[in-house]
Image (cartoon, rainbow, N blue to C red):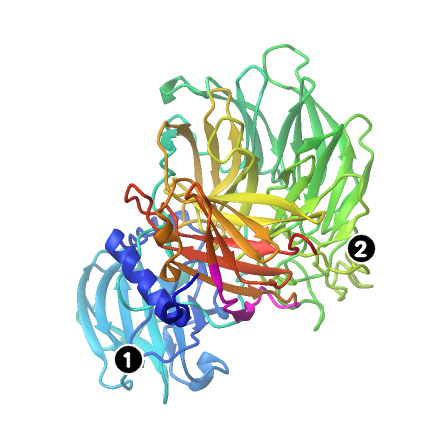
Amino acid sequence: MFQPSLSRLSRLSRLILLFCLLALLSPAALAQDPAKEDSDNYSLNPGVSFKLYHIGQDMDQLPQLKPGQLPNVHEVRPTLEFRQPGDFGDRRNNFMVEVETFLRVTEAGEYRFRVFSDDGSKVWINDTLLIEHDGLHGTTPGKMGVMELGSGTHKVRISMFQGGGGTGLWLLWRPPGEDWLSIPADRLSTDVGDERPTAQGDKQVDIPGPSPRPGTFRPLQTVHPTFTLEQARPEGFEPRVGGLVFLPDGRLAISDFPPANNGIFREVPNGKVWILENPTSTDTTEIVPRLVSNQFQDPLGLNWIDGALYVADRSQISKWTDTDHDGLPDYRQTLASGWESDNYHHFTFGLPYLDGHFYVALSTNISFDRNSKQDNIEPGGAFALNGPNPRYRGSVLRINAQTGEWTEAAGGVRTPNGISNGPDGTIIIPDNQGAWKPASGIYVVTPGEEPKFFGYYGSTGRSDFFPEGGVPTSFSDQPIVSPAVWLPQGQASNSPGSLVEIPEGMPYAGQFLMAEITLGGIKRVQFEKVNGVWQGAVYRHSHGFEAGTNRLAWGPDGCLYVGCMGASGNWSWRGKQFGLQRMRPTDQTVFEIESIHAEPDGLTVRLTKPVDAEVLQDPVNWVVSAWTYEPKPNYGGPKVGVHDPGISDLVVGEDGRSVRLVMGELKPDHVYHVMSAVTSTQGEAMWTGEAWYTLHQQPGE
């Protein structure tokens, strides 16, 4: 049992102690994001990217945003001058602004810049800090910096915070031989397209003090110690991987296309399918890509069944067979079609196979405003990027692999990238945050059950394409079914991709690894069934790949193959856009949380290695917070009902590898964020010291 004095520790005090313990274990801090590649690699539009973040606390200096959080406001503005209170919307106090643009310089030489801000600001050019004007102050006097610039484009980034009182932000420059001037709008451009997702709620910032080690309150930096990372593509082959499947003969099929998030719908084929010879070779010069076809549109799923290659294209599932016996499929047949695609965001994700059927999931419309390049929408026709859709969009389809006949297995998904085979003969569907989705989450479809509704309501507003209004999402007359596992936005995930089960004989066998595009890296997901309901936990696992991860596949060599993808804007990790790597298992072990399980009176946390009982029983070493989400039509949403569930007792297992956190009756459909700083009996720090467990049911209910 607790000592009375320790049991009364405030949650804040425990967090501070936890931070200090973590800092003692390792002082490593986050590496800075590398500079963006040359702007010629991006599609640029006039203006500057303007992001505003609501901060739920007083500030006297620029805070450090925790990564992966969407802004409350994201707009393209014409200039670098924001002089009026209305330039910052309705928010008057406690917010932060991030401005990014590419500055075109026509004459090389010494340039002077002066920033005016109320309150503090910093200015970077080409990722070099040029001006530091932090703290609480008014807009005068401005602070100056000098830099030699060559002709061409240069990245400019400005951070500014507003504490209270007046507000304003603008940047002037003094080109060689000229006076101080406003920077002309025709010198400014941005790679931000029409899609600019936002999220409600106050944002999280770093707490001042010792810097925790990567893996706890911070992203990881490298792959999990039970793997080493290898390159798996030859020089010059740069796939943006939408599908990944190994063939029975050991070759690897890859679908590859450049995703476009600029709102423009194109019917011209943009995708390719390759088959790689010798994909398991450690000598990348022996890996040979062979082109199957370049006549695909956004191919986002592959599978190989009974001697044929199946491809999930934008509006169909095609079957490819090898008729000339040269090792490459060459004969194309349409297996299934009949769902419409009239928006650039209308993807078809697939293709898990189960009991003679393929499964695909159809994403929904993203629309902007009456001036959208894609569609002319009447006022009220689109909200939070949620536009009208044709029938079946937002549905999960079950397709007979022999006849191509299909039915709807579920409805209410938004961007279900990464639909995969799940535990115990299920299909699992990671869906992305957005309209009606306050955070990303993983849903479960069980064959044979009645179709469920997963919460996305398509707009029924009218547009040029839909003069009578959009078609309601299938099964939207049913109650919303929450995800089995919530993926807290900006913490556990941002843009989830496919999942693969960890095979027998490996650490965490039976759990799953999940790709992640925007936050990058790979997450580990654990499922359990309680009272007939799926729930479970998500953990950090690996990081440091050459781009955001999208597709995963186990190879015949026992390695995990990681397909990467990206586009400009928020559809990438650090702007990186392609990659194919392999994770080779090692004989290393690692100390971390192995699993979390619901109990009648709380949660049991099981560890991979033993810990001294007095350490496990010390309440300083455990912090739990909880919250839920409330689906609304907004793009994303805040945590709701955040609270401390209160640990009343800690019960240690006999083997020293588990501890039961006694908290009494827990709240259903809540996320329980478990944080720990325990060390093993051998003095090892945790690889990652936090986990997010989604609870719907407790045993015995």
Q: On the picture, is 588 further left or further right than 301? A: left
Task: Tell me, yes or no, if residue 474 can be seen here.
Answer: yes
**Which quadrant does the C terminus fall into?**
bottom right
Q: Vertically, is 489 above or below 223?
A: below
Mark 2 or 1, closer to the camera: 2
Query: As drawn, which residue projects farthest toward the top?
Result: 325
User: Residue 363: within the magenta?
Assistant: no
Q: Vertically, is 554 above or below 205?
A: above
- Relative image position of residue 146 (x, y in whole percent): 17, 67
- Amino acid identity at mark 1: Phe
Query: As drawn, which residue projects farthest toward the bottom?
Result: 165
- Relative image position of residue 131 (x, y in whole percent): 22, 70
- Relative image position of residue 339 (x, y in whole percent): 77, 44
Give the number of the disc on residue 475.
2
Q: How crowded is mark 2: few (under 14 residues within 10 Å), some or many (20 or more)?
A: many
In which image quadrant can residue 358 be found?
A: top right
Name the one closer to the observer, 512 or 16.
Answer: 16
Task: Tell me, yes or no, if residue 110 can be seen here.
Answer: no
Name the one closer to the observer, 44 or 330.
Answer: 330
- How many numbered badges does the structure rendering display? 2
Mark positioned earlier in the residue sequence (2 or 1): 1
Q: Mark 1 points at which residue?
A: 116
Residue visible at 47% across and 51% down in the picture = 518
Q: Vertically, is 556 above or below 623?
A: above
- Magenta stretch in the rendered image: 632-649
Q: On the picture, is 413 further left or further right than 510? A: right
Alpha carbons under labels 2 and 1: distance apart: 53 Å
Q: On the picture, is 266 further left or further right than 653? A: right
- Relative image position of residue 35 (x, y in whole percent): 31, 52
User: Residue 643: within the magenta?
Assistant: yes
**Which quadrant does the N terminus fall into?**
bottom left
Q: Residues within 10 Å of mark 1 (few under 14, many from 20)?
A: many
